[in-house]
Amino acid sequence: MNDLVERLTNTERDQSFANVRPRDAATLIVLDHSEGQPKVMMGRRHDRHKFMPGKFVFPGGRVEVYDGRMSAAGELPAAIERRLLTHVKRPTKAKARALALAALRETSEETGVVLGTRNAQTPKIPGEGWKPFADANVMPDLQSLYFIARAITPPRRPRRFDTRFFAIDAKTIAHRFDGTVGPDGEFDDLVWIPVSEARQLDLPTITQVVLEELEARIAAGLETDRPVPFYRMVRGRFTRELI
């Protein structure tokens, strides 16, 4: 894995920006195994975006203050909760839930794909971002998530995030809304592409690295108790620590 660390360290970056504290964020990798070779869902960011324009990425975004208050059909496995709270100031169960729930909410907002369990009644939502789940009568299911990686954006970048990368099986897609992807959305294109071919897309370096981590985890069998790589810059060089 040393080549992954070297690739992140040697990536050219404009470091002329003021240093800011990274914000908690979450990303979701939706995996489709229905055709044998696993595929991932990726979106192309609009060229109008100031942050990573034109790049293919997994859906995701920052954690909102109300995310941890959303009810769920199933809770996080203990092993994932423990790893989510490693190297976290003031670790709480609510924080771990918020990180995982944010990944599911952001995916529904950016792609129209709502993942979870259909509910007989409309779930009560803590904020407007969860409206797609209420509209589709779907409860998020944290028990279906896998924790794949964590990465912190290097200092002196225009935006910095402390991002947790999760994965989930496409079988948990409970509903799809049309009209989310397009001129007015976060993505102008959405693709399902084999994991082995995804690195041919125009990707941020960290997305390339996480794809390689994902391939290794799939080959070994996705497990909730498997250690998770944590990428961050220390003294001008990226490090990879298993948590």
Image (cartoon, helix red, strand yellow):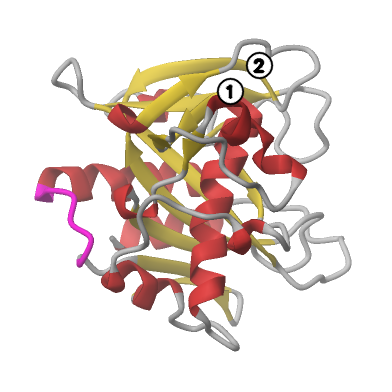
Which range is magenta?
A: 220-225
Position of residue 110 in the picture relative to residue 192 (left or right): right
Closest to the observer, 24 or 98: 98
Residue 42 in sight in this render:
yes
Q: Which quarter of the picture shows residue 240?
A: bottom left
Furthest residue to the front? 121
Q: Main secondary structure of the magenta part?
A: loop
User: Are the residues at dot 2 and dot 1 in contact (C-beta closer than 8 Å)?
Assistant: yes
Q: Quadrant of the N terminus?
A: bottom left
At x 34%, y 50%, the residue is 145
Closest to the observer, 106 or 176: 176
Residue 241 in sight in this render:
no
Closest to the observer, 171 or 12: 171
Furthest residue to the bottom? 90
Tell me the number on the disc at residue 169.
none
Q: Which quarter of the picture shows residue 98?
A: bottom right
Which amino acid type is marked by label 1?
Answer: Gly
Position of residue 35 in the picture relative to residue 58 (left or right): left
Closest to the observer, 115 or 72: 72
Number of residues whose C-alpha sits closer than 10 Å to that of mark 2, classed few (under 14), some (14–19) or many (20 or more): some
At x 33%, y 32%, the residue is 172
Tell me the number on the disc at residue 112.
1
Which amino acid type is marked by label 2?
Answer: Val
Q: Which residue is mark 2?
A: 181
Q: Quadrant of the C terminus?
A: bottom left
Q: Residue 214 in the image: state x and y as whole percent.
A: 29, 46
At x 52%, y 55%, the residue is 71
With respect to residue 199, does 142 lie above or below? below
At x 62%, y 47%, the residue is 124
Q: Which quarter of the picture shows residue 83?
A: bottom left
